[in-house]
Image (cartoon, grey):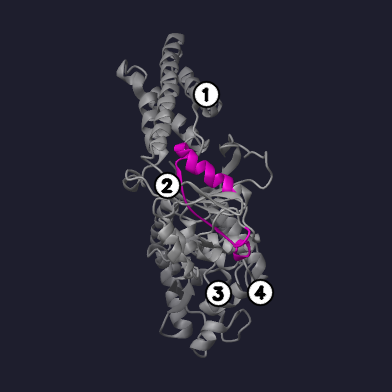
Amino acid sequence: MTSQPAAGHAGSHLGGLVSQMVPQPESRVTAGTTAVLPYARSRASSRTRWVRAWMVTLPIDVAALTAPLLLTQTYWRGMLAYAALAVAAFWSGGLYRPRRHVSILDELPSLGGRLLTSAAVVAIIAAQRHASVEYVSGFMRDVALSAGLVITGRTVSRALVVFVRKHRWVEHNAIIIGSGPVGLELARLLRRHPRYGLRFVGCVDTPSRQETVALPLSGSLDDLEHLVRLLECEVLIIADPACVESHLMEALIRPRSSRCDLWAVPGLWGSRPQGGYPDHIGAIPIVKIGDFTFAGPKWAIKRASDLVFAMVALVLLSPVLLLCAIATFLEGGQAVFFRQERVGRDGKSFEVIKFRTMRPLDEQESQTRWSIADDQRVGPIGRFMRRTSLDELPQLWNILRGEMSVVGPRPERPHFVEKFSAEYPNYAARHRVPVGLTGLAQVSGLRGDTPISDRARFDNYYIENWSLWLDIKVMLRTVAEVLRGGGR
């Protein structure tokens, strides 16, 4: 089991791909090499695509951690605190993340360390609150019982996961990116060992490998987006593609591809992830690539925080918004608000709302003029609002509507998106997430006439390293920029 994660120009060879999806022998011989073909999905797995390993593991962990409460309620506060702390420690330590090789022995050191740490924290607090050796020792007996039950429960849940995978009751469709020796071996292993929970459905690579590949191609990298939809793919595995990184990333960040789980064979064999325990398929090391777009629980957390921030800000800043509207009216007359087309998530256009600080000559100027920082048509009030970023406060409404986020890449006009995407390979990758009211690039001094390549790098760094704390840091730095008048 695993966590759930512009179309390519799929050609006529995709028709042949569909015919390959029917049950086939495991392999065929081509040019002296045994090649693995895609094979049919099991009947049960078509109904269990939504199942994930943590859905089994998490309830068993919670039941084991709270089981001593069935015997005595004397320590119920401490036991509930211990259970919550332990689950949080398991989650942060990756013990609920998807794994290809499932084994309780792999998890045991990390599991034991986090159980001991959680128990120690709660025991210290209990000792401070209850100056009684008898109370603390009784509490620790319940903790020891629950720890033993957790390890037992984990053993059972891991055995259950392996059992349902081996019987192909739960499996997820996987496309291998790379048709060389590593890709071929991965396809063989997935075919022979369903315990990894993946079903090989196809392989993509560059067209240059079409005649020399060890693994038959289902399409090229440019077809990946179409193949993900056609084959109902949920997992992508990067093996040994014959392409440059920028070409690979361009294929991976497309909307459907970016929703798949992404795994990769490390470029340096024998390497292992820091801060976790290694995973593998057969003897091939494999690592889970962190989500590089906002989806699932990650998106739910960010969207919830956006809604709370926008609603609170609109209420608290309503007097400021009213004063800005009056000042804008006095300086420029009617049409206090300025609406302009911008490009948001997945390249979709929307209208951004701002306080008007000047009037463009026409729509052409509005869409294609890069900067108005020194324009004489910007009056004193407009210049002050731009310098303090007060003109952007109406975008809180865009956030409530889901068109923007509080923190994210700066929204840009379609003309410049098209221009910059052609000039800078990584620029379009910014649009895999919602655009933001503020962003890491802006608070790092990349505003106005600053290099677009640097902005794109900062925006993509933010996306690939997102956390709630990173959003908080950006907002705090934004406040500092506003107070010192660091706007345009």
What residue did someone put label 1 on? 112
The secondary structure type at the circle numbered 1 is helix
| In this rendering, the label closer to the viewer, 4 or 3 | 3
Q: CA distance from mark 4 to mark 1?
A: 54 Å
Magenta stretch holds residue 196: yes
Residue matched to label 2 = 172
Nearest to N terminus: mark 4 or mark 1 = 1
Sequence-first tag of 4 and 3: 3
In the rendered structure, find residue 270 and report the number of the disc placed on it: none
Residue projecting furthest to the bottom: 361
Where disc 4 sits, the SS reads loop
Q: Position of residue 221 (x, y in %)?
A: 55, 62
Question: Residue 19 is drawn in which quadrant?
Answer: bottom left
User: Disc 4 to disc 2, how far (Cα)?
Assistant: 47 Å
Q: Is residue 312 left or right of residue 206?
A: left
Instruction: Name the quarter where the N terminus is drawn.
Output: top left
- Write down the region rendered in magenta: 183-212
In the rendering, which numbered label is found on residue 449?
A: 4
Q: Does residue 339 appear left or right of residue 290 in this picture? A: left
Question: Can you tell which quarter of the image residue 83 is in?
Answer: top left
